[in-house]
Structure formats: structure tokens, C-alpha cells
Amino acid sequence: MSKSKLILIACFCAALLAGVAAGVALRCAFGPPPRPPSLEEQLRLTEAQREQMRQIWSGVMRGPGPDRGRREELQKERDAAVAALLDENQKTKYEEVMKAFSDKIAALETEHRSAVEEAVKRTREILTPQQRAKYDELLKQRAGPHGPRGRPGGPGGEGAPPPGGPPHAGPQE
């Protein structure tokens, strides 16, 4: 290998290492982007209020688990019913099964929406007047001009946690 090729390879490696070092240095200097303040921080909740918020929202905002399991059970029930349709009345029966399924899903969604609305109500009850005003403002901001992100319910729409989230609770759906 010629001397000029060796020098060229060495320069390429040096430039590559310099780029990696610059990237690492910039990442260390600027760090990750700041996270938005949580609802607890924005409302300046007391420790007692934080615990009450956890209790209020824990049953409502468990994540997709409880509803997803119930939805899957309903879908399996529907699929089994559809598979059993083997006579000339298949279309009529299929439509009946689909209607029953849709009704059950709608009832499930209504039930969840009510739970979220109740949690919002109970949350407002534990807040001071100043915190309540801020909470209401945050709810409006989360809802935006077209309603709660296209979904009915509490802050940010059905299944979304309150702005900043209840502590350590994930969104539904």
C-alpha cells in the first residue's frame, strides 16, 4: 500500500473520530430536552392532594389492560357467533351479531367516559380554588378548539390522563 493511501486512510479515520467526539460533546453539553411540568408541579399539589389524585385516577387510568381484555373477549364472542352461522340466514344473523357487539362496545366506552368524568369531578373537589382554576385552564388547553382530541371524556379526551398525567399512570387506549 502506498504512503499516500495510508495518509488518506489515517485522515479519514481522524475526521470520523473527530465527528463522533463532537457529537458526544454536544449531547453532553445540551442534554436531553426538558420534560414539561407535571400536573402536580403545575398545580403545586400538597402531598395529601397527590395521594388523593393517585387514588382518584388509579382505577380510571390503568392503561389499555382492563378495557382491552374486555374488548378482546367481546370480539372473540362475536367471531365465534359469526363462525357458527352456516345456514341461509347468515347475513341477517351476522348483522344481528355485529349490532350486539357494537352496542356492547358503546356501553363499555360510555362506562369508561363516565369514570373519567367522575375522576375529573373528584379531582376538582380536592383542589384549592387557585389550583382548580389552573386545572380547568389546563383541561381547556388539552381539549383544544375541536374538543378533547376527538374523543369525549376528561382531560385530553377519553382515556388520556389529566395534563401532566396522574402520577405514574398511563393513558387508556
Image (spheres, rainbow, N blue to C red):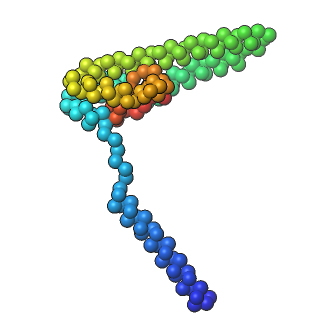
Q: Return the residue nearer the eye: 14 or 61.
A: 14
Question: Is 123 positioned to the left or the right of 116 in the image?
Answer: left
For the point 64% across and 15% down, the residue is 98
The correct choice, above or below, for 86 with respect to 42 in the image is: above
Q: Is residue 167 in view?
A: no
Question: Is 83 positioned to the left or the right of 39 in the image?
Answer: right
Q: Return the residue nearer the eye: 29 or 13.
A: 29
Image quadrant where residue 36 sits: top left
Q: Position of residue 154 (x, y in %)?
A: 39, 23
Q: Looking at this view, name the residue that lies furthest to the bottom.
A: 3
Q: Position of residue 167 (x, y in %)?
A: 32, 34
Q: Position of residue 6 (x, y in %)?
A: 56, 85
Quarter of the picture containing the N terminus is: bottom right
Q: Looking at this view, name the residue that lies furthest to the right.
A: 88
The correct choice, above or below, for 86 with respect to 161 in the image is: above
Q: Position of residue 86 (x, y in %)?
A: 76, 14
Q: Is residue 150 in view?
A: yes
Question: Is 55 positioned to the left or the right of 4 in the image?
Answer: left
Q: Return the residue nearer the eye: 74 or 99.
A: 99
Image quadrant where residue 41 sits: top left
For the point 32% across and 18% down, the residue is 121
For the point 49% across and 17% down, the residue is 108
Question: Is 101 positioned to the left or the right of 120 in the image?
Answer: right
